[in-house]
Each structure stands twice: as structure tokens, then as C-alpha cells.
């Protein structure tokens, strides 16, 4: 996974829990990278998982909560870093563009990126959207945080539910979003 994601995670941790906490997590996890990430570098996604598990032990917050919170934070950072992708009238339109626009551009910027795949389906009445996430890295919780960030950004209320359809190595999760 590209360093930009790790760097943002490290920044969030330092801002929330302090630099000492971050250093101590890195030490406890004995990471190959030493916990020093550059945006264009590529690192094993399991380093992020290790940091989350260690942080979970110390804070008592479960890994799901931590990864979802990071997803929301990351949404805000992506908005600051790549405003061009946010030129949409509503969250559904933005979410539909991840697979065929956003992540396509991300891959041009970072050719080594390992991106998830998304299938989207918008109901004819425009009030319900299904978004299915596929990835061998199992970061559906990160997707949830990013999705929640999008609805907050556009000031929309939705009911979000999810169905885990994973059968093999690849995580497959179908999100259903219904406008309130
Ligand atoms: C401007 C918006 C976005 C940008 C610039 C962006 C960019 C990226 C980048 C750079 C990565 C790391 C790739 C790697 O090296 O492996 C990534 C991964 C990911 N992106 Fe996006 N993304 C955006 C929006 C979204 C949204 C809205 C979602 C959620 C629905 C999403 C879901 C994910 C997930 C879950 C991953 C983790 C990798 C995985 O699951 O396999 N992204 N994205």
C-alpha cells in the first residue's frame, strides 16, 4: 500500500494520541519500515494492521472503530489533497466515480498502488445505492469510514447497511445506502 495512506495514519495518531504514543507503537510492532513513511513509497499493508492492533490494545477501542475513524479522517485529507475529485453534486455521484475515475487517476499517480475494486448500482429513483467492495487486503472498514465521510461532506442522511459476501481470500462486502 502506498505511503500516503500510512503517512496520514501516522499524522492522525500523532495529532490524537501524541508523538510518543506513535513512537511506542512503532517500537512494539517492530516494523520493517521503522514507521517512517514517504507518500510515494510502498509498504506492506500488514504494517497498518499491526499498528491498529497495537493501538487497540492500548486504547481499548476495537480495530473496527479505529479503522473506520481513520477512513473518515482520510476522506477529509483526500478532499484537501485532491479537490478535483470532489466536484460532484451529491455523495452517490462521488461514490460512483471511485472505480472509473478516482482510482484510475490514483493509479496514474502511483503505478504501484494496490487498489480495491468497486461495483456500483444506483436505483432508478436515485434514492438507493449498492456499492460492492472487493479486495484481498480486507479494508472494508476503511471504505465505511470514507463513505461516511462522503455523506457528511455533502450533508446527506442515509441508512448504511452492509452484507459480508466473502467466500475466499478476497473480502467482498456489499454496502447498501438508502437516503433518509
Ligand atoms: C479523492 C478520493 C480518493 C483518493 C485520492 C483515493 C486514493 C487511494 C490510495 C492512494 C489508496 C492506496 C492504494 C495502495 O497503495 O494500495 C487507496 C486505497 C483505498 N481506497 Fe481510495 N481513494 C479515494 C477515495 C476513496 C473512497 C471514497 C473510498 C471508499 C469507498 C476508497 C476506498 C479505498 C480503500 C478501501 C482502500 C484500501 C486498499 C484496499 O482496500 O485494497 N477510496 N485509495
Image (cartoon, helix red, strand yellow):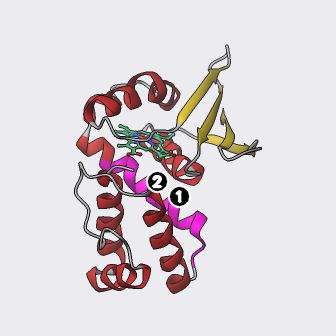
Image point (26%, 62%), residue name? 37
Question: Which mark is on residue 71?
Answer: 2
Q: Is ligand 1 closer than 8 angstroms to the Cβ of mark 2?
A: yes
Is residue 3 shown in magenta?
no
| Residue 160: quarter of image | top right
Image point (61%, 38%), residue name? 134
Image x and y of residue 161, in percent: 71, 44
Image x and y of residue 109, in percent: 26, 34
| Residue 65: quarter of image | bottom right
Label 2 crowding class (10 Å Cα cut-off): few <14, some 14-19, many 20+?
A: many
The quadrant where ligand 1 appears is: top left
| Residue 175: quarter of image | top right
Q: Residue furthest front?
A: 32
Pick the front one: 16 or 151: 16
Image x and y of residue 82, in percent: 26, 37
Image point (64%, 34%), residue name? 132
* Label 2 SS: helix
Question: In the image, which residues are magenta?
Answer: 61-77
* Label 1 SS: helix
Q: Are marks 2 and 1 in contact (CB under 8 Å)?
A: yes
144 left or right, relative to 3: right
Report the residue marked by disc 1.
68
6 left or right, relative to 167: left
Image point (30%, 54%), residue name? 3
Amino acid at each position: 500500500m502506498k505511503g500516503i495512506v500510512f503517512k496520514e495514519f501516522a499524522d492522525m495518531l500523532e495529532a490524537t494520541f501524541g508523538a510518543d504514543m506513535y513512537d511506542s507503537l512503532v517500537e512494539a510492532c517492530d516494523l520493517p519500515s521503522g514507521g517512517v513513511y514517504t507518500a510515494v513509497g510502498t509498504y506492506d499493508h500488514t504494517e497498518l494492521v499491526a499498528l491498529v492492533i497495537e493501538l487497540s490494545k492500548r486504547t481499548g477501542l476495537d480495530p473496527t472503530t479505529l479503522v473506520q475513524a481513520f477512513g473518515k479522517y482520510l476522506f477529509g485529507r483526500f478532499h484537501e489533497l485532491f479537490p478535483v475529485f470532489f466536484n460532484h453534486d451529491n455523495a452517490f455521484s462521488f461514490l460512483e466515480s471511485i472505480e472509473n475515475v478516482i482510482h484510475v487517476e490514483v493509479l496514474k499517480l502511483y503505478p504501484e498502488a494496490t487498489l480495491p475494486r468497486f461495483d456500483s448500482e444506483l436505483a432508478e429513483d436515485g434514492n438507493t445505492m449498492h456499492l460492492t467492495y472487493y479486495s484481498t487486503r480486507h479494508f472494508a472498514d476503511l471504505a465505511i469510514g470514507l463513505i461516511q465521510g462522503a455523506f457528511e461532506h455533502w450533508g446527506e442522511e442515509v441508512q448504511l447497511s452492509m452484507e459480508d459476501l466473502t467466500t475466499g481470500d478476497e473480502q467482498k462486502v456489499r454496502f447498501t445506502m438508502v437516503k433518509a
